[in-house]
Image: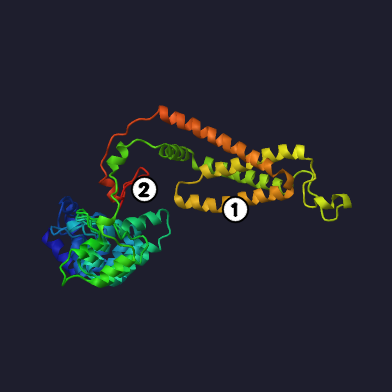
Amino acid sequence: MDPRLIVATQIGSIDELYDVIHENPYILEIIDAVPFINTPLHVASASGNLAFAMEMMNLKPSFARKLNTYGLSPLHLAIEEGQTRFVLSLLKIDPDLVRLRGREGTTPFHQVVRRGETDLMTEFLLACPGCIRDANVNGETALHMAVLNDRYEELEILLGWVQRLRQREAESLEMQFLNKRDQDGNTALHVAAYQNRFKAVKLLVKCSAVNRNITNRIGLTALDILHNQREHHRNRNIENTIRKSGGKSGDSLPKSKKVSEILRSKIRFTEHLFTQTERYRNQTSEGTRAALLVIAALIIATTYQTALQPPGGVYQENASDESKKSVGTVVMSHKYFFVLRSVNSMAFVGAIFMAFCLLPAGEGYVWSFLWIAVPLYVSYLVSMSVISPDTVWYFSISSGSVLIVVATYMVVFFLRWKRSKKKIPGTSSEMILEGFITLDLAKGVECM
């Protein structure tokens, strides 16, 4: 680096900086061309010279992402030197700097967790929520580092943050973060068991998304790790805590299938059915799906209303003496009501089935739909039975016709599946351990 630029950087003189640039307009470009170098921004970060650093960021923003020969960025240095105000100023300019990987893959977010900087850690999470996804070269996340360094306040913040996420796929992110494994296959719970961190174990098992029975690379659960420790090192309180929360030893767990075994096995009919249904959902655009769901909802509402108030109405309380015995029943003759009832029931059940098929993928959507659809269906059945109590069997016929159509479709679908069966080549499951899941194999594979 030019001696005059070194002096300007050390004293933080912006005027001196421009004097140097005036003499050599390419001086900053020359510095930027070096892969690893201590830039003027590094020097300003270590000394906390905010005004000079902001001017340097204005002239050469790329300096903020450059590592020096020790593998540290300006933000890493500022954190190391305790320059909190400087750190927050850089954060406002470029929040993604907290995810910049330095030496051994350590990010500034990892750094503040390891150092116990709770205020900075919270600011980093607010500015760049995605920083909790990052891991160093050993596969350790901020959660691992909080346990390894006895940072219980930071651990509480991390757990509280990830459990309060509400954005799309927040549940998936929570599962992946809490059960992320390092290079040895150890989750934060494994690390807490190895280190006999009772408080960390207690905090982790309170989270329902933490997998108590996940195994590491050598097939050990957190409970196995405690059992394998020498007697004078074993912590019975930790063992009891894990066991009470559902933790088990690896030997007592069912053996999970490898992805290669699942892919090489014959495709079951139910699996093929769900696959085709999912393909249909994915091929349907959001606009088309929304329009069809609106149509299905209108059909359900109309047919349900027809069941309650059929054409012609029902006998009322102030009916004549001859019809008093039929108060509340349908006025229409049974012959016409049978046809109306059958067609109406088919439309009602068909619309419910169509709405079910158009639901977004996910177990939560299915259960929510069932909680609504089943009581609605029972209510429809009861209403029809009350209006026409002597023709209950009509409803059985109409519902049966719908079931026959569905069953016929299933048979045709089954025959088509039998003719098109093909073997699927095997693959590796390593990427699934990192959250790269493209097939719905979660039931047969330990995905975390």
Labelled disc at residue 443: 2
The residue to which callout 1 is attached is: 375
Residue that lies at the very extreme toward the left in this rendered image: 3
- Whether residue 95 sits left or right of residue 354 in the image: it is left
Residue that lies at the very extreme toward the right in this rendered image: 321
Residue 215 location, x and y as percent?
Answer: 25, 55
The colour style of the image is: rainbow
**Three-letter amino acid code at disc 2?**
Lys
Q: Nearer the viewer, residue 400 or 121?
A: 400
Q: Quadrant of residue 224?
A: bottom left
Residue that lies at the very extreme toward the top in this rendered image: 419
Residue 169 location, x and y as percent?
Answer: 40, 53
Residue drawn 35% across and 30% down? 422
Q: How many marks?
A: 2
The answer to whether residue 236 is visible is: yes
- Whether residue 303 sits left or right of residue 138 in the image: it is right
- Whether residue 276 sits left or right of residue 6 in the image: it is right
Q: Quadrant of the N terminus?
A: bottom left
Q: Quadrant of residue 117?
A: bottom left
Q: Nearer the viewer, residue 143 or 428?
A: 428
**Three-letter amino acid code at disc 1?**
Pro
Disc 1: CA contacts within 10 A as few (<14), some (14-19) or many (>=20): few
Residue drawn 18% across and 63% down? 228
Q: Secondary structure at mark 2?
A: loop
Q: Nearer the viewer, residue 381 or 133?
A: 381
The answer to whether residue 60 is visible is: no
